[in-house]
Image (spheres, rainbow, N blue to C red):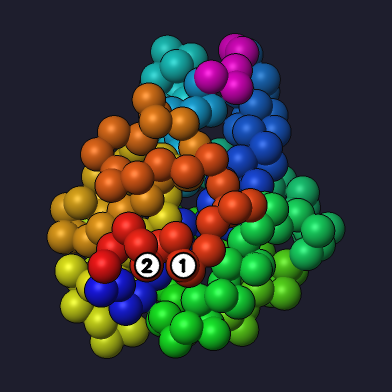
Amino acid sequence: MIEACIFDLDGVIVDTARYHYIAWKNIAEDLGFVFSKDDNERLKGIGRLESLNILLQIGNINLEEGEKNRLATIKNEFYLKLIEEMKPEEILPGVTNFLKDLRKNKIRIALGSASKNAPFILERTNLTTYFDAIIDGNMVSKAKPDPEVFLKGATQLGIEPTKCLVFEDAQAGIEAAINAGMHCIGIGKHENLKGADFVIPGFQEFNYDRLRSWYL
């Protein structure tokens, strides 16, 4: 039986992917090349510097580490300005009700996100109190598909990994959950989330009873 649920943030709880895309697109334009929405899909579920490396690869650009750090900082500052105005209305449909459902049924809840801005986003959307543990990009040294972020979440919750269920919208996150020895439900399309136990389009029609019927 599942005793804890661990959620990714971007694309699972809130739709911040569009803000990341705008910020990365701005960096690419300054460097003189086009960064498309399809390109942005490659950045799902991974950290800032690794995302920058992929962006530079797309633009066929080589930079020194110092310049990479400068650009990553600029991107983050621009992104922070974009998310400063986030409101609870930007929580993805069905998420709040599902979190309440988990709480009512005494399921522990954690966040496992590569985003270093995760606590700020949870605060802006009034979601912080739903989480028993928050693991963000400031607390891990290894990016997904390494399982570090999810294993730390399980440790903070005091729940064995085999009794944890991860919700992810990125292939790297699905692989991280598998590497952690956890169950995993993908959010999105089947073809983009290979290896997940199940794939759902979102939380609009998902609840604890359905989860329980899958993981008895």
Q: Is residue 199 left or right of residue 117?
A: left
Mark 2 to mark 1: distance in Å? Answer: 5 Å
Front-most of residues 140 and 92: 92
Residue at position x 53%, y 28% in the image: 40
Relative to residue 163, is residue 66 depicted above or below? above
Residue at position x 61%, y 84% in the image: 129
Evaluate whether residue 41 shows in this view: yes
Front-most of residues 161 and 65: 161
Relative to residue 21, is residue 37 depicted above or below? above
Type of the residue with mark 1: Asp
Task: Determine the image quadrant of residue 70.
Answer: top right
Under circle 2, the secondary element is helix
Q: Position of residue 53 (x, y in %)?
A: 40, 31
Q: Is residue 120 left or right of residue 208?
A: right
Under circle 1, the secondary element is helix
Type of the residue with mark 2: Arg
Give the label on residue 212, or none. 2
Relative to residue 67, is residue 180 depicted above or below? below
Question: How many marks can you see?
Answer: 2
In the rendered image, the quadrant that contains the N terminus is bottom left
Residue with the mark numbered 1? 209
Q: Position of residue 87 (x, y in %)?
A: 81, 62
Give the label on residue 24, or none. none
Residue at position x 24%, y 39% in the image: 195
Crowding at label 2, few (<14), some or many (≥20) Cα neighbours within 10 Å? Answer: few
Residue at position x 56%, y 47% in the image: 202
Front-most of residues 15 and 166: 166
Question: What residue span does the magenta drawing correspond to?
Answer: 33-38
**Circles 2 and 1: CB distance less than 8 Å?**
yes
Please check the rendered image and state whether residue 65 is part of the magenta-colored stretch, yes or no. no
In the rendered image, the quadrant that contains the C terminus is bottom left
Q: Is residue 82 left or right of residue 77?
A: right
